[in-house]
Image (tube, rainbow, N blue to C red):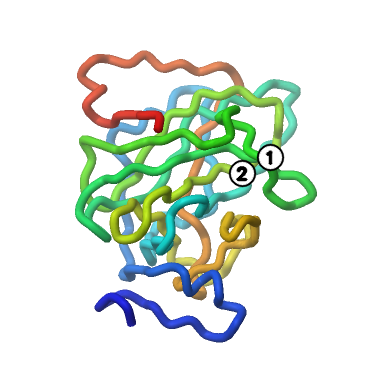
Amino acid sequence: MRIKGIICLAVGAAAAFAADTVTRGGDVAPGPNPEWNMAAGTRELRWDNGTRKYLVCWYTGKDSWAGNDFSEEPTGKSTTIIEIRVFSSNTWPNERWDGFRVGIFEFEAQKPGKMLWPTGGTGYFFKPSGVNGEVWVDVPVNWVTSRTDFVAAMEQVYDQPRCDPFAVDSNRNFLKHSWMYYAGRWTLLQTMSDPYFNLMLRVVVGDRPYWPAVEPVSLGRVKALYR
């Protein structure tokens, strides 16, 4: 056990990737973010059940991604990915926000592929502010795609314990839509949260370009930065 109160025991060679994570447990059922504004014509895509089972961190955050694949019914229209919603916390492991990256990846042949957004291929860095505790963090995307299948993911960026965690829900049934990019390849998510592997990461989409008006008073809620 490397850190008191954190699960750090790997079982067998199959848990090699999982051994590189630490978790913090305890069921938490968060309420909806009061600032969510689901405009007409938008919808939320999700696989989690809304109850957090574990917060999870990689020991090494760079190039360590966790994401969900999503599939939209073909409509003949382009889809706007409006936001990526990540359940995270600034109360563990280091009681502050450090920031993380998000990205959209292709999903072909039932496996994640190359990064589609941002087009630079390094992810979009986002550091929350104005929100505290274990919360859903809304990361603006506003990217239009003609693809119906894609993966939305977050990169931890920084090493544990100076990082922002991701979370898995309390559903013991792994739905096999959660993935990780680790050690240079994509595989289904494996962490020390066994048997809880459904990632709490969602996306909000719409059928047309969506550029919400931003009032000055709302700018203090979150800050988006590139690094």
* Left or right, 192 with reference to 164: right
Q: Position of residue 142 (x, y in %)?
A: 51, 23
Quadrant housing residue 99: top left
Which of pointers 1 and 2 lies earlier in the amino acid sequence?
A: 1
Farthest right residue in view: 109
As drawn, the label of residue 12 is none
What SS does tag 1 mark? strand
Q: Are marks 1 and 2 in contact (CB under 8 Å)?
A: yes
Which amino acid type is shown beneath numbered disc 1? Glu
Residue visible at 37% across and 60% down? 52
As drawn, the label of residue 106 is 1
Q: Residues within 10 Å of mark 1 (few under 14, many from 20)?
A: many
Q: Position of residue 12 (x, y in %)?
A: 57, 85
What SS does tag 2 mark? strand
Q: Position of residue 154 (x, y in %)?
A: 48, 46
Residue visible at 60% across and 27% down? 119
Quadrant housing residue 184: bottom right
Residue visible at 52% across and 60% down? 198
Q: Position of residue 200 (x, y in %)?
A: 45, 53
* Left or right, 108 with reference to 64: right
Front in this rendered view, residue 167 or 208: 167
Which amino acid type is shown beneath numbered disc 2? Val
- Labels in figure, total: 2
Height in image: 216 above or below 177? above
Front in this rendered view, residue 227 or 199: 227
User: Which residue, given by chain and number where applicable, does mark 2 sit on?
Assistant: 151
Name the quadrant of the C terminus: top left
Front in this rendered view, residue 78 or 49: 78
